[in-house]
Image (tube, rainbow, N blue to C red):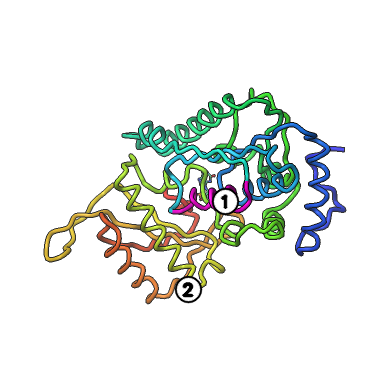
Amino acid sequence: MDSNKRPETMVRITTPELAAAFIDEQIAAVKAQVGDKKVLLALSGGVDSSVVAALLIKAIGKQLVCVHVNHGLMRKGESEQVIEVFKNQLDANLIYIDATDRFLDLLAGVDAPEKKRKIIGGEFIKVFDEEASKLEGISFLAQGTIYPDILESDGVKAHHNVGGLPEDMQFELVEPVKLLYKDEVRVVGKALGLPASMVDRQPFPGPGLGVRCLGAITRDRLNALREADAILREEFDNAGLNQTVWQYFIAVPDMKSVGVKDSKRYEGWPAIIRAVNTTDAMSATIEEIPYPLLHKITERITSEVEGINRVLYDLTPKPIGTIEWE
Ligand code: XMP
């Protein structure tokens, strides 16, 4: 039987009970596969790798070695949350690498979107590889592959996966959620006790804020983007829009306009709000965001974020606009 094919008899996991049964089954399978050997996992903090980490911690505890690479393009608070949940709460064997300078130095002056993606993906593999070679006795590599990844593996997503690892890595794979759809992974994550803010999060591109800090990335503009994005997310959460809007974020282009702040000329970047709904990311529609909320977000971003002096709302559906700006 093809182990990469979901059996037609497999029931969709929709309840905590079904999730608990799946977890028990996978714990036994992982234990049988791994024995007393060590397993390595690149833990990005996204839904899939987080659920795999929580599952494997339950199955094999400290035999799992998680590596979290902070490429400096994470959203505000993300790496901190990975450390808090996995190291502090779940007592995981977690190696945290702050590689911000490596990534941002390599990206300096690079403005072509695909080149930026290649640099980020390539450097990610390098950092992870270097870390893996320092560790002894690793026999397995765990991955948060999910069923749509298998179904789409010859399709659009290939170039998207920053977490793609070198093909010459000599590890056997452990992929406990590879037959699950995304909604099932979330149900399993909740049953494993992961926080909703981790399990229900919106999709976030592997290259992170790198493709939202448009053109050549600078640290000051990246910081402005990160702060503005955090305000947008906070306000959407407070208004309950995180339940109804599929993906929402800020992009900051590499251009300035004139403004006035404290009675003085204030040149700043615009923060562009993107908030879309979709089922498959192939096409997307624009959400009706209440005007009072847009005003509030504008007020907060322009007063709280250094370097931003305008807020714009992108009304373009996909097609013609892609969801990301680059
Ligand atoms: P686009 O911009 O193509 O985005 O309409 C469709 C979905 O894919 C996400 N996206 C990416 N995800 N690496 C990723 O992992 C990438 O390079 C990348 N580019 C776009 C985007 O956020 C949206 O959900």
Going from N to C along the chain, the mark reached first, 2 or 1, is: 1
Q: Nearer the viewer, residue 123 or 291?
A: 123
- Main SS, magenta region, reads helix
For residue 302, side relative to residue 126 (left or right): left
Work out whether 162 lies above or below 321.
above
Give the residue at x 59% y 42%. Answer: 43
For residue 107, side relative to residue 256 (left or right): right
Q: Secondary structure at mark 1?
A: helix
Residue 110 location, x and y as percent? 35, 34
Q: Residue 285 in magenta? A: no
Residue type, mark 1 in image = Asn
Observer-side mark, 2 or 1, equals 1
Q: Residues within 10 Å of mark 1 (few under 14, many from 20)?
A: few
Residue 210 location, x and y as percent? 42, 43
For residue 215, side relative to residue 67 (left or right): left
Span of residues in magenta: 77-91
Residue type, mark 2 in image = Ala
Q: Which mark is residue 88?
A: 1
Which residue does the numbered mark 2 point to in the structure image?
239
Q: Nearer the viewer, residue 300 or 215?
A: 300
